[in-house]
Image (cartoon, grey):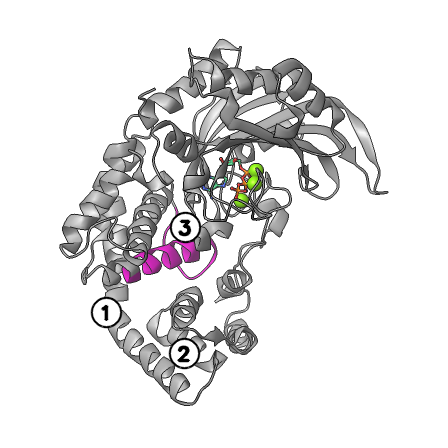
Amino acid sequence: KQLTSTQIRQMFLDFFKEKGHSVEPSASLVPFEDPTLLWINSGVATLKKYFDGTIAPENPRMTNAQKSIRTNDIENVGKTARHHTMFEMLGNFSIGDYFKPEAIHWAWEFLTDEKWIGFDPEKLSVTVHPSDAEARRIWHEEIGLPQERIIDLEGNFWEIGVGPSGPNTEIFYDRGQEFNDVAEDDPENFPGGENERYLEIWNLVFSEFNHTEEGTYEPLPHKNIDTGMGLERLTSVIQNTKTNFETDLFMPIIKATEVMSGQFTYGQSVETDISFKVIADHVRAVSFAIGDGALPSNEGRGYVLRRLLRRAVRHGKKLGIDKPFMYELVLVVGDIMKDFYPEVLAQKDFIQKVIKTEEERFHETINEGLTILNGILADAKKNNDTQINGKDIFKLYDTYGFPVELTEEIAEEAGFDVDHAGFEEEMTAQRERARAARASVESMNIQSGLLTDINVSSEFVGYNQLEVTSELV
Ligand code: ATP
Ligand code: MG
Ligand code: MG
Ligand code: MG
């Protein structure tokens, strides 16, 4: 089936509308009245007030396409086929209304019915929690999936400490061994393993227990459904592209970047492709985030934007782009997304100005900083050091505006470790000085790792510690 990403998004919302759901708007990436979250990171994050019972929704069935940002996936961008910083999560939700059977049947109908996506059912497999006999039974007896394509996964349990919790089931699309990055006989070569063959497209969470202070799991009187499917991944399977980046959601950005580079084209080498992908990903995230009211700064959300922009600028340099360019790509992002998200084009002048200013600021010092870093790396090589010390990393951060993650990435590419502990010491000392200078440091409440990624169970890797420490500066 030939479908554009715009059609796919709309099809999802239409499907669930037909099943009695209210279509909720895509909310701002900046959480509203929720100090526990840095960014909206899933569809459910904007509906928390219904899930925790604070407010009763008019309709217990809701659906949305929600822009989301996940900082824990920054390092994955461009390396895996499927991870972005900003992506869209397609979701359907039930607040004490329908439960497992409907959630599973509708997901299957949407994905396999010819009237909708029409995937070949043979390509799909699922994971379930080992304790969730009900989900396994529905997949096997009602949907007809063979037992061997229903895989038990211990990690398929969703909880955020005390409170509502429950098992989840994830749906995987088999792209075939030719898409894989591990061998056929690799133990990770299964749906739910670390591989690029079986692509996780949809996660259905069954919130059915109350995890009590005593550590027991009591059945909830009102059970909820929370699902999330990545639009970019679904689109990549439908458009049959190698990664999410060759879909119509990203390719126009990559094409525009090729023109600016004038030296490199996409598909030429693994290394330059990573740069094209990072740029395409990051420009979307910063354009939307700035449109939603975030601004580059040295703390919290602003630091994430600064880090993304500076990382993209460095990848631009790798493609031979030596002047501000990200701001020009804002127009391409706005154009791709305008049907569902008019806000980027509507605010293009402001977004471009913020990005351009930030790029210019970084350009003023980046070459000097890079020269110094290259000198440090050369010295380290000469001395047979394996590690770059914390003082040097701090200086690059403090004087040249190099996000520590950037220094780290460059050092690691050159084969060195970095002295995290030493860097942290310098940061602590700096923080103490800042604290002494200012009576009160206004800082964001750092979210706990689990809240950052409310929808994730086992794979959650934790909020980047270095990013956290940098927030207070
Ligand atoms: P993965 O294991 O691939 O990292 P996940 O299990 O962390 O994904 P969930 O928390 O289950 O992801 O989110 C629901 C859906 O959102 C996923 O099935 C996927 O389609 C999509 N998704 C999650 N993280 C990203 C991301 N960083 N970029 C693009 N899509 C994502
Ligand atoms: Mg998942
Ligand atoms: Mg997963
Ligand atoms: Mg993940």
Q: Residue at x 33, y 25 (%)?
A: 6
Residue that badge 2 annotates: 395
Magenta highlight range:
294-314
User: Observer-nearest residue: 344 or 454?
Assistant: 454
Residue 295 higher or lower than 13, as above or below? below
Residue that badge 3 annotates: 77
- For the stretch drawn in magenta, the main secondary structure is helix
Task: Using the rendered view, name the quadrant where residue 55 is placed.
Answer: top right
Q: Circle 2: is it few (<14), some (14-19), or many (20+) Cα within 10 Å?
A: some
Disc on the earlier residue, 1 or 2: 1
Q: Is mark 2 within 8 Å of ligand 1?
A: no
Give how far across and how far down residue 215 sits, in percent: 83, 42
Give how far across and how far down residue 240 sits, in percent: 35, 31
User: Observer-nearest residue: 389 or 303?
Assistant: 389
Mark 2 or 3: in front is 3
Q: Is mark 3 within 8 Å of ligand 1?
A: yes
Residue that badge 1 annotates: 364
Q: Residue at x 41, y 66 (%)?
A: 409
User: Observer-nearest residue: 289 or 9?
Assistant: 9
Magenta run includes residue 456: no
Residue 105 higher or lower than 254, as above or below? above
Between the C-alphas of marks 1 and 3, the distance is: 26 Å
Q: Residue at x 57, y 15 (%)?
A: 59
Q: Amino acid at mark 3?
A: Val
Q: Secondary structure at mark 1?
A: helix
